Amino acid sequence: MKIHSIKFKITCWYTGIITLLFGVIFVFALWYLGRYSEEAINEELQDEVGDLLESIYGDSLDFLSENRALFFDDGVMLSIYDEDSSFIEGIFPEDFPNNTPLAAGGMRKVRRQGESWFLYDRKTELANGRMIWIRGIYSYSSLVADNLWMIRLMAVLFPMIAVLTGVIGYRMLVKALHPVLIITETANEITSSMTLSRRIPVPMNRDEIYELCRTFNQMLESLEKNFLRERQFSSDAAHELRTPVSVILSHCEYCLEELSLPEEAENEIQIIQRKARQMSELVSRLLEISRSERKKNKLEKEEVDLELLAESVAEELQEKAEQKEITIEIEDRLKEPVIHADLSMMTRLFINLTDNAIVYGRKRGYLRIRLEEEGDKVRILFEDNGIGIPLEEQERIWDRFYQVDAGHTRGENFGLGLFMVRQIVEWHNGTASVESSPGRGSTFAVVLPR
């Protein structure tokens, strides 16, 4: 149980309140028990004194010496005194102060050397007119023993009740908050898979959790519609732009090759041609993303030789790398370079990361592509000594159309390459990350299951 979780906090509050409540009840019970016990002792003393008085018949007290049992009953010790406080007959505690004066009235309490006793004295007249005192004594130790037994019982029950309350309360909270756990797990799955078509299961009871699930599903439905509209717009725009861009390029080529134009006009057409090619490349990238997104749920997996793929891509981009005098090195440390993946997507992944290293690489730099083992997975590293990426921008480079240094690429890059890389890696249940330092270069790491 996490100490910062709601279940832990509510369990602590619940247990604390119940424990405090039981503590108050316990203290009140002890107080009431003490008062009740004293009242009961008072009644017992009066009853026993009255019973002894009823046992005295006539005006003689001689028979009492032969009936010692009359002087002790239910913890009460009885004794008889003459009018002048002279002891006649009876029993009393061993340490009881015998010089305690007789006094009519209610129950009294006498203390001596840490011991305490309850007293009840009653004066009465015998048939012959003789006045006597009857004293009842009850040891306070008996009451203390009863209370101590109660305290020990509560001392054992108190922690047991607290623990039991905590366990029961926690189990109740786990059951009550289980729908929240399902919501969290479903939301994490939606986040990791980017599948907005998923919905959170709605409980049967129409309570607060029901409303929360329903609100989440409404939000997901709205997000899904917006994303679908955005993707459809990108796809439609790319399709619509492809034809006019092709026409612009073909007319530029015709003008430059077939017509005799002034130098100034030829330069202007070359500018138009260059920008139209950039637009054509952007349209191609957008269409490629659109096709990839439609294909993500039905990948055509086959055996892909990563070493062969890396060499093929390096050869394809060799001319572009030579323009900046960048060397491409491939190091294969895999026991078996073959994995099961979608070949077209893996090709795009290698092209994008290799092209990215060339575009942002320094003159006379290098790109090392390393293939390594990582448990039952493969690790592909693209290490360069280019311009590097600031720490605060390293997470944003995976976003669509984001570029760290747009001026550095002079319009050669559209900020879609790394976006596609992460999409392809996630569709293959892998991970993509980057370690970089400005001015020292970057290392892109792709981990894929075999």
Image (spheres, rainbow, N blue to C red):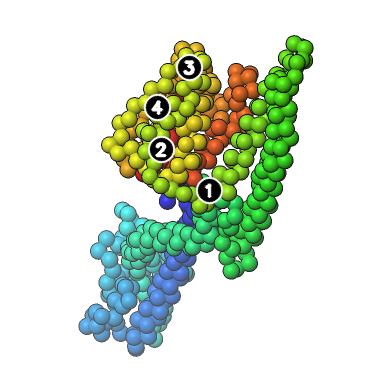
Q: Which tag, 4 or 2, sits closer to the chain's start?
A: 4
Q: Going from the N terminus, do you reach mark 4 or mark 1 first?
A: 1
Q: Secondary structure at mark 1?
A: helix
**Mark 3 to mark 4: distance in Å?**
17 Å
Identified by mark 2, the residue type is Val
Where 203 falls versus 309 (above or below)?
A: below
Sequence-first disc among 3 and 4: 3
Q: Residue furthest left?
A: 66
**Image coordinates for residue 335, horizontal then vertical, percent:** 28, 36
- Residue 238 position within the rendered picture, expressed as x and y whole percent measured from the top left: 68, 39
Give the residue pinned by disc 3. Answer: 322
Residue type at numbered disc 1: Lys
Q: Is residue 93 left or right of residue 329?
A: left
Mark 1 vs mark 3, CA separation in Å: 34 Å
Q: Amino acid at mark 4?
A: Ile
Residue at (75% x, 15% y) in the render: 260
Q: Nearer the viewer, mark 2 or mark 3?
A: 3
Query: Where residue 407 appears, x then y in whole percent?
Result: 63, 18
* Nearer to me, 439 or 356: 356
Q: Earlier in the sequence, mark 1 or mark 3?
A: 1
In space, the residues marked 2 and 3 are separated at their CA atoms by 29 Å
* Callout in the foreground (4, 2): 4
Q: How many marks?
A: 4
Of the pair 1 and 44, the residue shown nearer to us: 1
Find disc 2 in the rendering and name its residue. 447
* Element assignment for label 3: helix
Which residue is label 1 attached to?
296
Q: Nearer the viewer, residue 420 or 285?
A: 285
Q: Which residue is mark 4?
A: 369
